[in-house]
């Protein structure tokens, strides 16, 4: 081993050790977040804000430690750097990117944002409960101001065209408002065609047939059965997961401790059913990065869009398929004491695939879901550069819902206050949901070539081959490539909406017999 | 404002800001611990170890940051330092003490001790399960050696007479083995007299009358009723507490988020009942430090002994009183569907105050409990200076149990292996349990002068005045004074066992009709 190789290796190891500490503290922080949403006594909210701020400050300090900059420079200048393998170089690239961005963000801005997040979320909850946007407005304004400050700084580092692009890049590396706009345009056009066909069809499914009173304890058992099907273990002495109950379902965790939440409604079993499938899709992704990449930057998701592709794949492509229900419907009937005995399998499957414009994103069907996202994306595109103000949000929101979905929003609780994302400062986050759907369609299209009989397997209750395919082709790729590159590597194609629209059109033409 | 006053104030504020961060990270760590004991999926255990190690490393780094030493020196050398008020000076004193101790302990010793703790606890569990002290012995020897090294270093910093005193001072500032010995001697003599009277009495209570099957859900409702009584809120939208279930009950938290745990046994309701009262006593202490002292060293308990005085006060002085049960027994009967209808109130109260020497400390009655502690204290006094060796522990232990409690220990699992404390390196910790009981008696004695009719209030279901007295006289004193000073300030007397013995003798003479 030459002297420079020795130095390269030891610098790399030291860099990775420092980053391991940062990642570990991030995973600890995610437990603190989880606790805030699931278990924390309500009075603890301010203290929790301080804890999260202190943790983010510590993490920021470690992330921006000049020693990391020194190690990066030494590594990058080492004559043997170019000959390092792809994995090492990707780790270095990701740490460099993170370091450059974080060192530019002032510690105070980071801490203020973390603190404001806890406050804004708390106020958002109260505003939503009382249908009163004016209560939330000042906290959202503060949050938007903080995120704009960050966006302006990040724009310089990331060399993006606009501040909004800098925010998008946080969640979807290398994607831009322009690139998203062009996919979203094709998506919107395609969805509108399908939507019109569904609405025009004389053969409407009957979603009311699903509204049956299912006791919460029975629903909890159904959840446990569903996660067993996708091999997300929450019960055994080796379990690496758990299910809790929150207002809004989410997934959080890392490798051996990945947790999902759901919300049970006695009169609407489908809510918990599909949220469990959705979060379960996220969870098995988080659990199946390469074990040897734990605590390394590459041992993580490449983007939120890819994360969402996994949740939507499991929720919709699997969970709303006729084949899954061929297997699971008898089980559901058994668990519910034959509550659905009078409803034929096909009528059940058609009902859970019912398409109808609605007010609430998280309750939207597959066809209208992305229209909700496109509305939010358009609003963010105007909000970040200040073309509209926070005070204009309710009006703008309601106008767009009328325009795209033909819906009248009656109060802000079912309108602009419905989502937590802006309260938590997640501007640029929403587009990833639609990108996830688009990617899930491309993944399906590719998987079908490897597992032509996947539907038959599913109907037989076998999710194993599908999960193995996802693990190998998506999960185990971790963060080796930026999302657009990973799509290309897996599918051979650029990101495009055709497979997703084809998948939806196929299903809808069956459901609506058009 | 003079220049030196300005510098003093800004140095003080900077020091407090740094300490606030440390305290906040400690509170975040306690949530991570709580999660590990209550909610964590089993597979997460290794990751959790890494998270806790990373947090403790960060906290240690902040605690020993030379900048804290610089600020302390500047403040202490400032000509206006002496004229600072008592609260400021106490904060500075506590930070100085902590800083000097933490910076003197070599990082390697701290890391080795943490590592040995994990190993020793693991081996202790296995040794306890197999009743085999010899398995545990080498690990305990290593732990003892590490703690002796620390004690020798801390002895220099703390200027204590012996290394054991330096360890005691960690948990009970300024107390020494000598001062504890003299109180414990009087305590032991007094307890032996009461114990003999109880054992000799022909009027024995019947603890078997308590063994009734109470479904766990009913016990959970009883817990909720009990914490309502002591105004530990776990249910309202303003709740600052919660109850969870763990193998060993504990309390953790800070001000607005303080959590207790219990363990339910279907056949033994009293276990959860008194652990809820005990942990509830700890919890209301933690919730009621002065709000404006939050994130300051003075906004905390002065010692473990004082903490234990609060838990034992609520568990025993309140929770095993005839008056509490005059109020609560009808409620207990209602909640349990009249399970105790055949058992008269007085027979119930006598049964929960039954006195009988036993092997296991945590199951001991009020009279014998402190004898368990005295045995451990006497052993530690010989162990730390090497008068006895680790190999002698089982024999010494068993001899003392025979001598003080008349008990034959049949195996080490019910003897020297019963407690986790030594495995975790907690030498000097045990005495605080007995000190807590002693202090609880002195507090009762003093409170009776302010609230002469407290028993009548209790029998009417009114805990308000008692709680107010505890808040004002104990909780709101925080860590303003070392424990012996605080006892003197509250009660006007030095720490002494007479009130506690009087209280016990009064109760036992009623229970045993002697």
Image (cartoon, coloured by chain):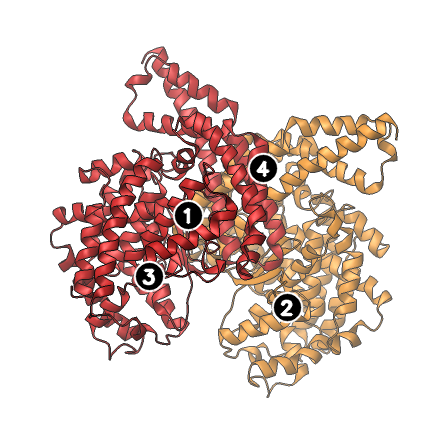
Chain colours: A orange, B red
Residue at 79% from the left image edge and 68% from the top image edge: A465
The location of residue A299, given as percent across then percent down, is: 72, 48
**Please, what secondary structure does the residue beneath circle 1 have?**
strand
Q: Nearer the viewer, mark 4 or mark 2?
A: 4
Residue at 47% from the left image edge and 35% from the top image edge: B22
The location of residue A110, given as percent across then percent down, is: 55, 35
Which residue is the site of mark 2?
A227
Out of A342 and B433, give the one closest to the viewer: B433
**Please, what secondary structure does the residue beneath circle 3 have?**
loop
The location of residue A103, given as percent across then percent down, is: 63, 30
Task: Identify the image quadrant of the N terminus of chain B.
Answer: top left
Q: Subunit of mark 1?
A: B
Can residue B506 be seen in this snapshot? Answer: yes
Q: Subunit of mark 3?
A: B
Which residue is the site of mark 4?
B111
Q: Nearer the viewer, mark 2 or mark 3?
A: 3
Residue farthest to the bottom, as pictured: A342
Q: Which mark is residue B357?
A: 3
Q: Nearer the viewer, mark 3 or mark 4?
A: 3
Task: Identify the image quadrant of the C terminus of chain B.
Answer: bottom left
Q: Subunit of mark 4?
A: B
Can residue A354 be seen in this snapshot? Answer: no
**Residue A504 falls in image quadrant:** bottom right
Judge if badges 4 and 2 mark residues of a common chain: no
* A479 shown above or below A264: above
Judge if badges 3 and 4 mark residues of a common chain: yes
Judge if badges 1 and 3 mark residues of a common chain: yes
Give the Cα distance between marks 2 and 3: 50 Å
Horizontally, is B213 left or right of B465 in the view? right
Q: Which mark is residue B253?
A: 1
């Amino acid at each position: 081993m030459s002297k420079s190789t020795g130095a390269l290796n030891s610098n790399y190891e030291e860099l990775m050790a420092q980053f391991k500490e940062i990642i570990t503290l991030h995973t600890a922080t995610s437990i603190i977040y989880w606790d805030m949403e699931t278990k924390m006594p309500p009075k603890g909210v301010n203290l929790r804000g301080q804890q999260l701020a202190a943790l983010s400050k510590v993490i920021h300090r470690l992330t921006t430690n000049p020693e990391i900059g020194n190690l990066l420079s030494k590594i990058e200048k080492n004559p043997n750097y170019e000959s390092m393998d792809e994995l090492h170089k990707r780790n270095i690239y990701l740490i460099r990117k993170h370091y450059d961005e974080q060192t530019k963000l002032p510690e105070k801005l980071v801490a203020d944002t973390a603190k404001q997040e806890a406050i804004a979320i708390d106020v958002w909850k109260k505003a939503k409960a009382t249908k009163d946007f004016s209560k939330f407005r000042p906290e959202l304004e503060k949050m938007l101001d903080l995120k704009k400050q960050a966006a302006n700084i990040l724009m310089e580092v990331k060399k993006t065209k606009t501040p909004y692009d800098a925010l998008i890049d946080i969640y979807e590396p290398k994607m831009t408002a322009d690139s998203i706009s062009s996919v979203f345009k094709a998506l919107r056009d395609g969805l509108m065609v399908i939507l019109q066909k569904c609405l025009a069809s004389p053969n409407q499914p009957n979603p009311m047939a699903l509204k049956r009173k299912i006791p919460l304890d029975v629903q909890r058992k159904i959840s446990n059965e569903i996660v067993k099907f996708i091999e997300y273990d929450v019960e055994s002495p080796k379990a690496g997961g758990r299910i809790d109950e929150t207002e809004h379902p989410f997934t959080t965790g890392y490798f051996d401790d990945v947790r999902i939440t759901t919300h049970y409604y006695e009169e609407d079993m489908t809510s918990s059913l599909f949220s469990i499938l959705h979060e379960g899709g996220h969870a098995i992704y988080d659990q199946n990065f390469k074990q040897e990449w734990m605590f390394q930057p590459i041992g993580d998701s490449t983007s939120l869009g890819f994360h969402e592709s996994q949740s939507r794949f499991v929720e919709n492509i699997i969970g709303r398929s006729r084949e899954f229900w061929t297997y699971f419907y008898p089980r559901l009937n058994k668990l519910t004491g034959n509550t659905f005995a009078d409803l034929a399998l096909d009528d059940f499957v058609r009902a859970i695939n019912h398409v109808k414009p609605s007010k609430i994103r998280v309750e939207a069907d597959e066809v209208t879901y992305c229209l909700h996202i496109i509305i939010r994306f358009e609003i963010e595109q105007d909000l970040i550069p200040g073309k509209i103000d926070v005070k204009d949000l309710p009006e703008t929101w309601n106008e767009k819902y009328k325009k795209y979905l033909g819906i009248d929003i009656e109060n802000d609780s079912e309108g602009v206050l419905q989502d937590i994302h802006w309260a938590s400062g997640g501007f640029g986050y929403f587009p990833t949901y639609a990108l996830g759907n688009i990617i899930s369609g491309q993944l399906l299209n590719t998987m079908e070539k490897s597992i032509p009989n996947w539907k038959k397997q599913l109907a037989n209750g076998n999710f194993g081959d599908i999960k193995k395919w996802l693990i190998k082709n998506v999960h185990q790729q971790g963060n080796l490539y930026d999302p657009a590159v990973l799509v290309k590597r897996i599918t051979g194609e650029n990101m495009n909406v055709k497979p997703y629209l084809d998948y939806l059109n196929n299903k809808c033409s069956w459901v609506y017999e058009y």
